[in-house]
Amino acid sequence: MAFDALSDRMQMALRRVTGRGKLNESDIDEMMREIRLSLLEADVNYKVVKEFLAKVKTEAMGEKILKGLNPGQQVVKVVHDALKDILGDETSGITFKPNGMTVFMTCGLQGAGKTTAIGKMAAYYRKNLNKKPMLIAADIYRPAAINQLVTIGKQLNIEVFEMGINQKAEVIVEKGLAYAKEKGYDLVIIDTAGRLHINEELMDELVRVKKVSNPDEILLTVDAMTGQDAVNVAKSFNDTLQVTGCILTKLDGDTRGGAALSIKQITGVPIKLMSSGEKMDTLEVFHPDRMASRILGMGDVLTLIETATQNIDEDEAMDMMEKLMSNKFNYNDLKKQLKMIKKMGSISKLLGFIPGMGKLKEAASQIDDDAFKFIEVIMDSMTEEERKNPELIDKSAKRRERIAKGSGRSVAEVNKLRQMLESQKQLMKKMNGMSEMDIRKMQNQVKTGQMPNNFSKGKGKGRGQFRIK
Ligand SMILES: Nc1nc2c(ncn2[C@@H]2O[C@H](COP(=O)(O)OP(=O)(O)OP(=O)(O)O)[C@@H](O)[C@H]2O)c(=O)[nH]1
Ligand SMILES: [Mg+2]
């Protein structure tokens, strides 16, 4: 997974200070040394590293911190905020025209993931904003490039405007836009040719495409795997085209983090979207605060909830949350939950979002669909009363035997399932700092699109435990 090494080292550095009642300057210096190494190793630009450390140092050494309660946790918050700042501070939205046709133009190096990201954006905004997208194939240097976009369009059932490779890119774009307008499309995304290196001729072509299309967004795709080299590339694209945002791609790969952590600070171009897979539904809005939390192992409950609400009925999800919190969770709920998980995607991906669960990710990636099946079979062989009142099963060995027999599974497996229910409850106890009102508040913010980005210190003794305010 992306940023694993960075994340591990940062967490190690923080462990030096979290949970400590008192901190002196040398504790902080040692932590800073480790953070510095972990950032440089992740190929973060040295200027960014320097600024980052200066910021952490000033804040962490502040009088308030050293005299305050739980200084360790306060330092974690300082590091989190500094990391969030270099990632871009606030979430940068994508601009849509209030009425009429919005136009996005893409640019980027060869193979950075432009064409793939175009398909993903079209699918994402169709699903989430009800847009009617059309794509324009203006990469005229390889016939295969047009075929690739056409294939993606077919797969998503989205129209692709193309005129082969014998017209100039700007001519295709001009005609494409006129066609889209006539057809009533309200989002047009232009695919452009990739460059191996920055090259004046092709840059000029992009300038001409920009001129005829007057795009609302000029999105630079940046391969997260390329480290801080990506920053120089971004700089030259930005100098010529005044890029409005970045799409960070291939975050599913084993990237170290250099590009993600350097690009905003050095070029001023915000990362707006991130893509983490070859499938068409792997695009997400980039939230600097959540990314910072993820890197520091603070989990990402909000993204989890957003993913959940995108794919399942919101009321059902909140109902489930409330049940989990109230400790009334039973087998019927577990059944529903498994169904939801199946709808949302892999369990390991979801676990990565929950605080403290990062380490379980790998274990969970081994859970396969077959395991789900046997769990379901066992639950099917419970009576409705048993499903509603798990303690009936806990209390009676006879019931457990009957259930095992009825499902054709072993008693040990039945017991495994009981443990699973229990661990779900335990998991949620970890989040028990949230009252029902907080949950509702959060739910509303998720609904209205304004996410809370403020983490507050937990009251617990645990190291670096943060709760959503
Ligand atoms: N794993 C992974 N692969 C990706 C991602 N985005 C794109 N790819 C793959 O990267 C390769 C290049 O992607 P394209 O979308 O064709 O890149 P491009 O920028 O359009 O390339 P050119 O048109 O040649 O300039 C393809 O094999 C994609 O499947 C991603 O987020 N994760
Ligand atoms: Mg392409």
Image (tube, grey):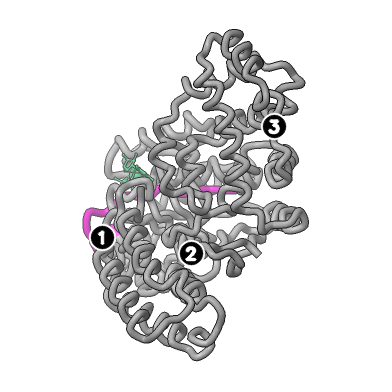
Q: Position of residue 420 (x, y in %)?
A: 56, 33
Q: Amino acid at mark 3?
A: Asn
Q: Which residues are magenta?
A: 187-202
443 vs 96, nearest the viewer: 443
Q: Which residue is mark 2?
A: 463
Dot 1 or dot 3, earlier in sequence: 1
Res. 164 mark: none
Spot occupied by residue 183 in the image (x, y as percentages of width and height): 62, 40
Q: Residue at x 69, y 32 (%)?
A: 330
Residue at position x 62%, y 14% in the image: 403
Residue 380 visible within the image: no
Q: Is residue 392 magenta?
A: no
Q: Secondary structure at mark 1?
A: helix
Foreground tag (1 vs 3): 3
Badge nearest the viewer, 1 or 2: 2
Q: Quadrant of residue 237?
A: bottom left
The amino acid type, in three-letter code, at marker 2 is Arg
The three-letter amino acid code for the residue at tag 1 is: Glu
Of the numbered discs in the image, which one, if any, rests on residue 201? Answer: 1
- Specify whether 131 is left or right of 57: right
Location of mark 3 (residue): 330
